[in-house]
Amino acid sequence: MIQGMTRAVKESWLLKGFLGLVMMSFGIWGVGDAIRPPIDPNVVLMVEDFDIRTEELQRRFLGEVRQVQNSLGPQFTGKQAVELGILDQIQQQLINWATANVAVTDWGIIMPPEVVRDMIQREPAFHDQTGQFNQSYYYETLSANQLSEGEFFSLFTSDLKQKMLFSSVTANAGVPLALVDGLLDYRTETRIADSLLIDKNEIDVSKTPNENELIETYERNIAAYTSPEYRNVTAILILPDDLVDAASISEDEQRIYYEENRHLYEIQEKRQVAQIVFDSKEEADRVYEVVIAGKTLSEAALETGINPPVEMGEITADELIGIPQEAVFGVGLNGVAPPTESDFGWHLFEVRAIQRGAIQMFEAVQQNIVTVLIEEQAVDLIYEASVFLEDELAAGTPLKEISTALGTQYLDFTAIDREGKDPNGLTPPGYIDKDRFLLTAFNTEEGQDSALIELEDGGIYTIRIEKVILPTPKPFSEVRPEVVLHWQQLEQGRIAENLAVTLTSEIGPSTSFPALAAADDRVTYAQLGPVNRFGESLQLDYIINTDLISQDVLERLFAVTQGESFYAPVEAGHAVARLREIGSGLQGRDDSARDQVLSSVKNSMGEDLLAQLFRGLKKRYPAVVNQEALDQLALQ
């Protein structure tokens, strides 16, 4: 659970340094004028006295490159990232961040530490399943992002200041109620129509196509009869197991490794801990005196009239950041440590449960040890193999010969497409890491070898594109049965459309739609609506018949006058309809619907106000960019 929460936080606001809340839109913010000022060469940009150092920009840039490489493979380079604008994007983010920080400081916006602490404890990302602040989640997140409590506290404080500034702007976004009602009417206006569905699949085609008609169908739809691009790909796969025989690792070696690394197989002691955080040592001392007198922490909190302790959950000694271990692991069960100071204030910790540590027996981890020793011993061997492989590749040696010389795995995919399928639509076995393998295969030129690609388990592989088989139309004679079926489907659609045209022309104000349906077994009748212009039903007791809905149907339904008929294509064939009734939309003006529209419009207007604010901030606090440092980074 902790890992899942950590990952969620990392991927959202924390890893981005809370920039998401600040950067409503890159289009709003932009980048300040880039000039060549007398600036510290280690500073890449500056807004007033707030500077961003080169290593910070580089760290963020390399992090983004690694993320792209995780998806596209290691062949994605920093140069490509620069060409795609990733460096410029990060530069914008940092300028925006600096500009906002300068503004809140210059305008005297403050955030008391006790408020920051309270807001951190209210942050849902740090709450457990009971909805309580969980110190383990908090420490795990800080550790995963290599942040000290002080650094996190500073980031969070800055973020709250900026939110205070922005909320003061957006909160004053006034919305005319006439605009809200107009939009609500537009969204909730409905139509009811009599309709006929002509299902093309129910139409019998008695005509037999001649050869010329089939050839014409084939030629007009040639893409449907064209095979995808295939590639003949060969590969060499070198795994640690290929170079080191598990049987060659003696039990003595395994036991030596086990003894030297016993700490790796220890199950750390866990403690269930609760805490109270105080603004001052005096407050903590006052409560601690009650504890010393024989009360539990909860009883002491009740007696002194303060909030009860907050559960921290189960934590290990390694999860404590910024807090001395003895404050939690230096007391016994039900013990309360003396007041302890951190960046959040003064703490009283109470140990409520202890799960003693243990060590896994050798037999239980023996196979894991063998795997580790194989990987360790294979490091040098894989390096030597990679050098030999690159030399042979440079000499033009066929991969199969190289594989035989190394005694490693050789893979041969005669023909695969971008989805990893062969011409029979099957997935051949043997893919190494499928997505990256295929991406590399279709981004490497014919006759070329890919760069060496590392696997997570320590192995490497390279692929060669032996041949590119371009998309090729299949011969007419080979796909003739498919063309016949295609022609029949097109003919069904043509007949359905002609029938829709005929019916529409015959419909008058008093024409009975049910009678028309009864007269032709290819046609079915149904009432369409009430439905709004988005294809939604606003009545709980009416379910939209999706067979009668398409974008064409909705556009024409809301364009015709009452009593007017029309036809339009739908997925199943064609629909014929006559507008019977127009709903005013007033039925949608309930409080919840109105509040939803009001909130949406207010948010949009708030963003417009923020855009105006930041245009002003850019003029007041122009950004200075060390273009020389930026260019140097782009060249690396």
Image: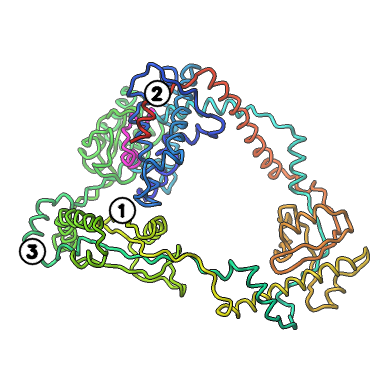
Residue 451's tag is 1
Residue 148 in the magenta stretch? The answer is yes
Q: How many marks?
A: 3
The x and y percentages for residue 78 are 37, 41
Reply above or below: 117 against 589. above
Which of the two marks, 1 or 2, is nearer to us in this view? 1
The x and y percentages for residue 323 are 27, 33
Instruction: Write down the residue under mark 3.
Output: 250
Mark 2 or 3 closer to N-term? 3
**Amino acid bearing label 1:** Ala
Q: Nearer the viewer, residue 603 or 293?
A: 603
The x and y percentages for residue 632 are 35, 30
Which of the two marks, 3 or 1, is nearer to us in this view? 1
Instruction: Write down the residue under mark 2.
Output: 626
Which of the two marks, 2 or 3, is nearer to us in this view? 2
Residue reaching furthest to the left: 252
Regarding mark 2 in the picture, which secondary structure is present there? loop
**Amino acid bearing label 3:** Ser
Mark 3 or 1 closer to N-term? 3
Q: Which residues are magenta?
A: 139-154
Give the spatial CA distance, label 2 vs label 3: 59 Å
Mark 1 or 2 closer to N-term? 1
Left or right: where 146 falls relative to 498: left
Q: Are marks 2 and 3 in contact (CB under 8 Å)?
A: no
Q: Nearer the viewer, residue 588 or 201?
A: 201
Regarding mark 3 in the picture, which secondary structure is present there? loop
